[in-house]
Image (cartoon, rainbow, N blue to C red):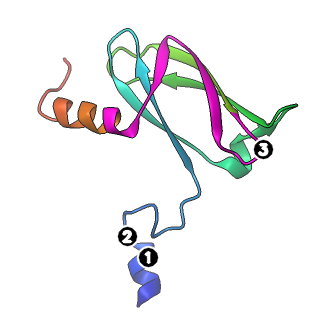
């Protein structure tokens, strides 16, 4: 029974989610995008740790944001370079989601 509960649960913790969640804010329209990286497959080893290159597209103005995320040897985020966006916190993401829940862009 516990297996089925875990299988149909919507929380990442219940599924054993090992993903790294990052939040990127578009500098053009202020939309915040949640990005999930799977460390096993999306972090590439480099001289000082790991790197992940992504193209992030928001759902409001559809601007393409080129991003490079740099991680240390323990796969902890060290820095981010985002062209057309900026790294923000999970709290900023949640605030943006609650503020935009009633409005839909046309």
Extent of the magenta region? 71-92
How crowded pointer 1 is (Cα within 10 Å; few <14, some 14-19, many 20+) is rated as some
Q: Which one is earlier in the sequence, the residue at label 3 or at label 2?
A: 2
Which residue is at the front of the view, 84 or 89?
89
User: Residue 80 appears at what percent x and percent y?
Assistant: 60, 24
- What distance separates the C-alpha of mark 3 from that of mark 2? 32 Å
Q: Which one is earlier in the sequence, the residue at label 1 or at label 3?
A: 1
Q: Is residue 66 left or right of 89 when viewed as pictured? A: right
**Which residue lies at the image location 33% right of the left edge and 22% below the top edge?**
31
Residue occupied by mark 3: 73
Residue 9: which numbered mark, if any? 2
Q: Are marks 2 and 1 in contact (CB under 8 Å)?
A: yes
**Which residue lies at the image location 83% right of the left edge and 32% below the top edge?**
48
Residue 77 painted magenta: yes
**Which residue lies at the image location 47% right of the left edge and 19% below the top edge?**
86
Residue 28 painted magenta: no
Question: Number of labelled discs?
Answer: 3
Residue 20: which numbered mark, if any? none
User: Residue 16 appears at what percent x and percent y?
Assistant: 54, 67
Residue occupied by mark 1: 6
The N terminus lies in quadrant: bottom left
| Disc number lying in front (1 or 3) | 3
Q: Are marks 1 and 3 in contact (CB under 8 Å)?
A: no
Q: Is residue 24 above or below residue 40?
A: above
Under circle 3, the secondary element is loop
The C terminus lies in quadrant: top left
Q: Is residue 89 left or right of 21 when viewed as pictured? A: left
Q: Are marks 3 and 2 in contact (CB under 8 Å)?
A: no
Q: Is residue 10 above or below residue 76?
A: below
User: Residue 25 appears at what percent x and percent y?
Assistant: 41, 22
Instruction: Please identify the residue farthest to the bottom as the structure is shown.
Output: 1
Under circle 1, the secondary element is helix
């Amino acid at each position: 029974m516990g297996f089925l509960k875990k299988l149909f649960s919507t929380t990442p913790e219940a599924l054993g989610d090992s993903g790294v969640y990052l939040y990127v804010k578009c500098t053009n329209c202020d939309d915040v995008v949640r990005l999930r990286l799977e460390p096993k497959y999306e972090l590439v080893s480099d001289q000082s740790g790991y790197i992940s290159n992504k193209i992030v597209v928001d759902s409001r103005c559809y601007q393409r944001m080129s991003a490079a995320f740099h991680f240390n040897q323990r796969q902890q985020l060290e820095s981010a370079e985002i062209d057309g966006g900026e790294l923000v916190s999970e709290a900023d993401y949640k605030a943006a989601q609650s503020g935009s829940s009633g409005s839909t862009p046309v």
